[in-house]
Image: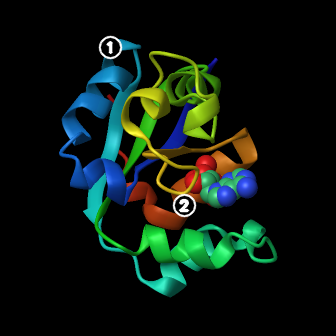
Amino acid sequence: ATQRTLSIIKPDAVAKNAIGEIIARFEKAGLKVVAAKMLKLDDDKAGGFYAEHKERPFFKDLVGFMTSGPVVVQVLEGDDAIAKNRDLMGATNPKEAAPGTIRADFAETIDANAVHGSDSPESAEREIAYFFESSELCPR
Ligand code: CMP
């Protein structure tokens, strides 16, 4: 079924000038960008996005990393978009990511892991609404 998912190109991948290569992978896999913007997150915005991880030992580093430079947030739409995006990204830890995945090709560490993608329909709905007004989504 057609789904929408939230994708974030993280500060490490933006710093590597890999925005275009990463979005090309989404498009070549049949996902369409229906919303996109570049943002510099502050502690509140990044911490709120990752609220479910607030008690985890890596939370402070995660927020520090996500506020270290601009990110590109996008809404991707397509058949089975949530799982398709996760397949394209590869494992959270780039050292475990399958060859040819975005994290294998662009990421160095579990914190600087190039991309984020929603992990379920419920989180996709929350995460999309966290960054975009419904009027900013462009059906196509
Ligand atoms: P992301 O998919 O954006 O969701 C939470 C992020 O926390 C994750 O990618 C990683 O970049 C980061 N992280 C750091 N350490 C861990 C860990 N031990 N387990 C899961 N995520 C981690």
Q: Is residue 82 left or right of residue 10?
A: right
Q: In this view, does 71 lie to the left or right of 128?
A: left
- Where is ligand 1, by quadrant? bottom right
| Mark 2 Cα shell of 10 Å, populated few (<14), some (14-19), many (≥20) | few
Element type at mark 2: helix
| Mark 1 Cα shell of 10 Å, populated few (<14), some (14-19), many (≥20) | few
Q: Nearer the viewer, mark 2 or mark 1?
A: 1
Q: Is residue 122 left or right of residue 128?
A: right
The residue at which mark 1 appears reads as 28
Identify the disc placed on residue 119.
Answer: none
Q: Residue at coordinates 54% horizontally, 36% vertically from top-left?
A: 4
**Quadrant of the rendering where the C terminus is positioned:** top left
Sequence-wise, the earlier of marks 2 and 1 is 1
Above or below residue 109? Residue 80 is above
Q: Residue at coordinates 47% horizontally, 28% vertically from top-left?
A: 104
Identify the disc placed on residue 129.
Answer: 2
**Amino acid type, residue under disc 1 in the picture:** Lys
Can the viewer see residue 135?
Answer: yes
Q: Residue at coordinates 75% horizontally, 76% vertically from top-left?
A: 54
